[in-house]
């Protein structure tokens, strides 16, 4: 994970990049109520599991979801995947 812009209390968000190796994954515990995540696939293939349902995205595609649930980022391919994540914390 590479932090691009640390949390800013004036705009209540942070932005970072995550690189997932082939077959790699990262699971997260739920965030606070109201947190929103915005993910854009910068390179490679990416999948995310939300509430037991898996969504597959390719380079250039994006997804937004409420971060107050458990979720997993996954790279199902044999090549590295890079995603950019924007986290918005409305009650910070």
Image (cartoon, rainbow, N blue to C red):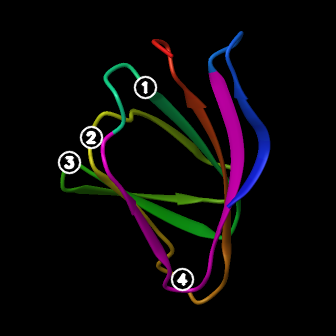
Q: Which mark is residue 52?
A: none
Disc 4 versus disc 3: nearer the observer:
3
Q: Residue at x 18, y 56 (%)?
A: 52
Rounded to the nearest whole Å, what is the CA distance between mark 3 and mark 2? 7 Å
The residue indicated by pointer 1 is 35
Tell me the mark number nearer the camera, choosing from 3 and 2.
2
Does residue 7 belong to the magenta stretch? no
For image coordinates 53% across by 65% down, the residue present is 46
Pick the residue in front: 29 or 41.
Answer: 29
In contact (CB < 8 Å): disc 3 and disc 2? yes
Q: State the separation of the CA atoms marked 4 and 3.
A: 22 Å
Q: Which mark is residue 51?
A: 3
Q: Secondary structure at mark 3?
A: loop
The residue identified by callout 2 is 69
Percent x, y of residue 28: 37, 55
Q: Does the magenta segment cover residue 24?
A: yes
Q: Would you say the magenta stretch is mainly helix, strand or loop?
A: strand
Q: Residue furthest right?
A: 4
Please give the range of residues in magenta.
Answer: 13-30
Q: Are marks 1 and 2 in contact (CB under 8 Å)?
A: no
Give the percent coordinates (x, y) of residue 16. Answer: 71, 47
């Amino acid at each position: 994970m590479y932090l691009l812009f640390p949390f800013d209390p004036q705009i209540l968000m942070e932005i970072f990049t995550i690189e997932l190796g082939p077959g790699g994954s990262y699971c997260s515990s739920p965030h606070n109520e109201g947190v929103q995540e915005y993910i854009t696939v910068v390179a490679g293939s990416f999948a995310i599991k939300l509430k037991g349902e898996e969504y597959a995205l390719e380079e250039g595609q994006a997804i937004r979801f409420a971060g107050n649930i458990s979720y997993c980022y996954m790279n199902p391919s044999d090549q590295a995947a890079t995603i950019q994540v924007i986290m918005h914390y409305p009650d910070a």
